[in-house]
Image (spheres, coloured by chain):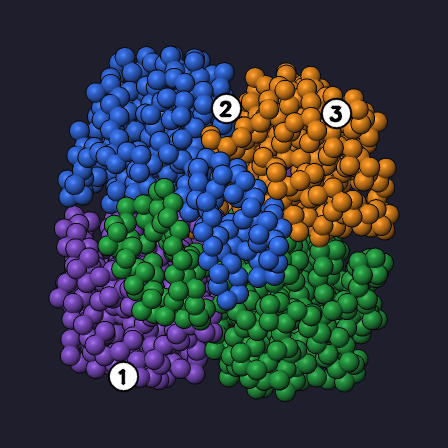
Chain colours: A orange, B blue, C purple, D green
Amino acid sequence: MIVVMSPSASEGEIKSVIEWLHEHGFEVHISRGKVRIILGVIGDKETLFDLPVEALEGVEKTVPVTHAYKLASRLFKEEATVIDVGGVKIGGQNFVVIAGPCAVENREQLLETARKVKEAGAHFLRGGAFKPRTSPYSFQGLQEEGLKLLAETRAETGLGVVTEVMAPQQTELVAQYADILQIGARNMHNFDLLREVGRTKKPVLLKRGFAATIDEWLNAAEYIMCEGNYKVILCERGIRTYEPMTRNTLDISAIPLVKGLSHLPVLADPSHASGKWKLVAPLSRAALAAGADGLMIEVHPDPSRAFSDGPQSLKPDNFATVMAELRQLVPILGKEMA
Amino acid sequence: MIVVMSPSASEGEIKSVIEWLHEHGFEVHISRGKVRIILGVIGDKETLFDLPVEALEGVEKTVPVTHAYKLASRLFKEEATVIDVGGVKIGGQNFVVIAGPCAVENREQLLETARKVKEAGAHFLRGGAFKPRTSPYSFQGLQEEGLKLLAETRAETGLGVVTEVMAPQQTELVAQYADILQIGARNMHNFDLLREVGRTKKPVLLKRGFAATIDEWLNAAEYIMCEGNYKVILCERGIRTYEPMTRNTLDISAIPLVKGLSHLPVLADPSHASGKWKLVAPLSRAALAAGADGLMIEVHPDPSRAFSDGPQSLKPDNFATVMAELRQLVPILGKEMA
Amino acid sequence: MIVVMSPSASEGEIKSVIEWLHEHGFEVHISRGKVRIILGVIGDKETLFDLPVEALEGVEKTVPVTHAYKLASRLFKEEATVIDVGGVKIGGQNFVVIAGPCAVENREQLLETARKVKEAGAHFLRGGAFKPRTSPYSFQGLQEEGLKLLAETRAETGLGVVTEVMAPQQTELVAQYADILQIGARNMHNFDLLREVGRTKKPVLLKRGFAATIDEWLNAAEYIMCEGNYKVILCERGIRTYEPMTRNTLDISAIPLVKGLSHLPVLADPSHASGKWKLVAPLSRAALAAGADGLMIEVHPDPSRAFSDGPQSLKPDNFATVMAELRQLVPILGKEMA
Amino acid sequence: MIVVMSPSASEGEIKSVIEWLHEHGFEVHISRGKVRIILGVIGDKETLFDLPVEALEGVEKTVPVTHAYKLASRLFKEEATVIDVGGVKIGGQNFVVIAGPCAVENREQLLETARKVKEAGAHFLRGGAFKPRTSPYSFQGLQEEGLKLLAETRAETGLGVVTEVMAPQQTELVAQYADILQIGARNMHNFDLLREVGRTKKPVLLKRGFAATIDEWLNAAEYIMCEGNYKVILCERGIRTYEPMTRNTLDISAIPLVKGLSHLPVLADPSHASGKWKLVAPLSRAALAAGADGLMIEVHPDPSRAFSDGPQSLKPDNFATVMAELRQLVPILGKEMA
């Protein structure tokens, strides 16, 4: 940590801050500039993050020079993490596609979607049984019945199932049915839930909160990992900005940035990022080109009858076109798609 | 809802959309402009919010003309809601101040703070026993022990207790000790938690999510209210913007806006909004001047020893000065402070 | 400046960076932590801001510890700047109100507005003759004819005139008529224009760009001041955020923050910040309470006939009510209003 | 335009609004819902954009259903615009790369860069002679001397020159030397400058303002086009968001969106978008994959000696690698690169 003293800090204040840091077990390096003094503070990182140094008299600001997460960092583990889910590999050279409806609505809808996305080359089936909705009066999902339909559909198609868990007490139930537990964007800061999925052995797909910084996102992964579950898959799904034309703004830069900072696989969700099905194809290609390890795409057999997110869902034939385009690009970008 | 058709929509597409809306039970009013056609859709609001009209061919966009929340709206209840918490009234003409440390650290810290803020005129004591923290390695709160210290301090000082509940399964426990249950900004979209506190009879202080729109915030209140708990107190605590000098940007306009849209009381939290104790005094005055029904302020006997949020905590004597300033302004602004 | 080296920086890279800094005339203080090395760099500030240190091998990031502006800083001049404009003082203990229509439309509209705002206690008349508009097909202002109407109205009412200059080549013309030159939010980064108004002797009202940081805003003031014109008045007018309910988000914290960083007067413009006339009263009170030195408010005799910004314009009688409220608050907040 | 009446609007208010619209020459279609009334307003678009309908009593809000720009719209011209600049085509199937230093520093730097980027396959040379800088104390460019060096370098290498014009009075001078006039992000709202370059016959590269909406950006293009200059090239260069790790957030979705709304070519600038040279390669690939018509990339022979933007500049050999990657992708994405 760096401590920047105020230009008006007195010698007494500077001395106090240094003594305070020594008392707390830190080494201090002093740089005296013309206008102000800067302290380089060296010591145990975990403690440093909790120290209210800015509350000391004479301190203008503090600047962290390192991040709080460890297990999620490339410094901790240099080689890319590859997670095997029922024989399908996520991370490394592999490019995977998760596809399916926003919500599980009924057996026919799910099964038809699953068959079609499988045919087009998808590796996993997505579908929400528990749905986080802005209004309490919107469709909230089929809940356990939805989970059962997902399991049935897996039995029929062989596609592994990715589905969201919204609350700690649902974790056990959802984990009985899902191959990958999804933490939605609205729950990225739900620390009790993160710990809970960290205590399972299931892979976790962790979506970035729609206003989370990259640093907060990797700390959320750390919450899961420090409970012993290292199988975390990150998913960029757009951040909230002032631009009204898209539901969110896909932060495409986050993909190569996070792959530099962390060894974990990084997917992108062009459906939620844009909210417009017409943008799914170009954003899918862009995410692959930027280095993503895979995609999560909403597909519905009849988007105009979808209970939620219809406007951003692809029809099965459009999805097949996207897959064909990706298949051409994947090898040129040094990836492989099963 | 308004449906804006694309300029390139065919007559067949327009006809299909209208038929589709009729099939779903809606009346449709057609406005034909030079370039495009607009449909005014009239019918049951709850259903409308779930309809994927934008997924229909030829539709450019849809524009909602009403909001999804009802119980939280001024249209539902015109007069201001006044919530009585142990004899202290929140809402209406009343101006209340909740003060205390970010986290409960130990008996001495809590009791000293409580006595001092009471002496200065605060009406409630705040203090976190369960703490949401970005890093899993940061101090996570004293948990049940912290709740007990809060209850002890209430017994000694008479100040009602406001404390955060972070997960549905904690609700019962926290509700045994707290006078007001706080939902933190990170949990504003934690719908299971909202429902759970909605099932208690305790007043709930609902902080705005740091990237939540006003509409989403009022829908979060609706989640609590539609479970039967109408005692919701809103709290603006700053939103995330590009400006790096403050921790968040206090959305001062949200205070009069929300008081126009809803009958619920609205407080402001200048400590979290700014992250800087020096801004707490001017922002407290500004929130009162903008029409807030009260404030939530972090106070710590020794901010440089605080386990969290030291830089934004006031010392007790600074808090007393803020209270004295507010006391002068309150009557001029048509409010009363007990 | 602080240079944070990458954890993977080699000893050779560290040595090169230090030598490079020495070559450029800087002193370097080295802090060696467990994971990485931090360099405190001391030397001439102006040069430092142009150095591409981050382009050197092994450097992770650089952190500026001081700001680039000087003349605008409290470190350069501690006492508050008070600007006398035709006998009316701006800054210090004084609270001033600038009021008038968005655009000058015709003699009657301007004169009627001016008389009414004067009667209500305004100190200056605002009115645009050159109008920056998003669409080229919107009303662009009466231009020189508008300036003449402003001068006539000043002659009749005695109110000093604040009007916008949009391009360097207009400066001389506008300066002939205006008492205060306004730089609009869209032009805050128009450096040629800033220099040009810096070469006049007229006071300049510098609005904050709608996506400008506070640091950029004070650097824009520096552009004017370093040409010799120290009479700069800052005006916070809302920043662009994700919240759709208001045109912009008034950054109320910026008022006390900037008054701490700079000696220049700071006004607020609640009309542009909110885009809604109903919010003008609460935001005006809030800005005063937060420490603003004055306000800029849009008033139109008949907002429904305004050529621009009607929805955010007050009618004269509402403006009189706002002024009456402010008059009560001003003395309590330690200010004076003539 | 749609006018949404307030639920509390009286019959008299509704009648007045309708009469007011009729008086202004509009047709009105009325949709009466259970809670409120919606008016569909049909008439001359240009007038509509200036009408202060929201200022009328009883109006809750207005919703525009069409955009103000015309010449820039796909509705006005369906086929893609292809601009020929000295034999190099921009738009349509063509993929072009503009490369060079942020600022022209001296003959050697410029010539060396130009030769190397030409060798790697770039089609145009960029380089700033007039530099917009946040601080007045930063390097402001070589100005006319820089323009001469650019012309000399073109003579030697054959590369067309793209350079920025910052003020209306510079336009004539810059147009003597440049093949493409660049309008920088900070000047996208500088309407006098837009008109001025609209009066030249030179192609204009119009960068998106860093907080401009897509709608505002296309209206800025309209300012240029309505002066008779249809040769406008758009360039997405990142928008300002809350994420601190990148200088800006590349709005990758804007590329396909704008290509749908407009017939104009759209480039991307990954250097300014990210501020980090390591992100230039993945973002270049992503922009191409999302449908961009080309790229603008900063290249410097020795970024650590660059007068500005060193941290985001590629070295010539890295640039050559990026070009080689793009060359493989271009044909698969249905584009051609000369």
User: What's the residue at 47%, 30% (across, down)?
Assistant: A136
Amino acid at pointer 2: Asp
The circle drawn on residue C148 is 1
Which residue has dot 3 on it? Answer: A153
The residue at the point 78 percent across, 33 percent down is A115
- In the image, residue D207 sits, relative to residue A218, either above or below, namely below
Question: How far apart are the alpha carbons under marks 2 and 1?
Answer: 64 Å
User: Same chain for the residues at labels 1 and 3, yes or no?
Assistant: no
- Which-is-in-front pick, marks 1 and 3? 3
In the foreground, B223 or B96:
B223
Give the chain of mark 3.
A
Q: Residue at x 34, y 58 (%)?
A: D54
Find residue A33 and name its label.
Answer: none
Q: Give a yes or no on whether discs 2 and 3 share a subunit.
A: no
Crowd class of label 2 (few under 14; some 14 to 19; many from 20; radius 10 Å): many
Amino acid type shown at disc 3: Thr
For the residues marked 1 and 3, what is the alpha-carbon distance in whole angstroms? 77 Å
Badge 1 amino acid: Lys
Residue B170 vertical position relative to residue C296 in the rendered view, above or below: above
Q: In this view, does C187 lie to the left or right of B291?
A: right
Residue at mark 2: chain: B
What residue does disc 2 label?
B192
Helix, strand or loop at disc 3?
A: helix
